[in-house]
Amino acid sequence: MINQILEIVGLIFIVIGSIFLFLGALGIFRMPDVFNRLQAGTKATTLGGMSFVIGIGLIQPDWFWKTFIIVIFILLSNPISSHALARSSYKSKIKPFFKGNPEEMDAYKDVVENQSSDSEY
């Protein structure tokens, strides 16, 4: 009985994860620039991957602790790698998509300029 409940809950998690992974792929395809694509891909694939792996862990209880470690790794590595990619894209002078004056929205510009002038160590 408990195995059937775990299997049903696991399948629900897998379906939810698949939906979020699909939406993340769609967001990467539809967004206009690298920064929006990173945001859409990271948030959706983090939640989708975690849900998918948790579902597998619930269906196969012997694998639960292994899948739990994988979920923790996804939770830690996916946002950090996205941040590193966004920061390197910004420092490579890739301009974000913006309808209007791009100088008005660039609040990060002052931070980068202050860091480069303050780093004398």
Image (cartoon, helix red, strand yellow):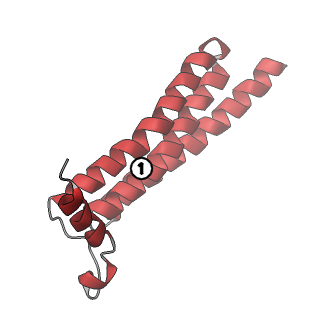
Q: Is residue 11 left or right of residue 19?
A: right
**Is any part of residue 17 visible from this angle?**
yes
Q: Based on the displayed image, in which of its 4 quarters is residue 94 positioned?
A: bottom left
| Residue 26 in view | no
Position above or below: 44 against 35: above
| 31 lies above or below 79 | below
Residue at 77% from the left image edge and 23% from the top image edge: 4
Residue at the extreme top of the image, as rendered: 62
Residue ID for mark 1? 42
* Residue shown at the point (55%, 17%) measured from the top left: 66
Residue at image point 21% right, 67% down: 113
Residue closer to the observer: 84 or 31: 84
Q: Amino acid at mark 1?
A: Thr
Q: Quadrant of residue 3?
A: top right
Task: Residue at the far right: name it.
Answer: 1
Quarter of the N terminus within the rendering: top right
Tell me if 58 is positioned left or right of 19 in this view: right
Q: Find residue 31 and report its horizontal and vertical position in percent.
A: 33, 65
Q: Position of residue 80 (x, y in %)?
A: 39, 43
Residue 13 appears left or right of 121: right
Q: Which residue is painted at 25% across and 81% down in the image? A: 102
102 relative to 53 in the view: left or right: left
Mark 1, secondary structure of its residue = helix
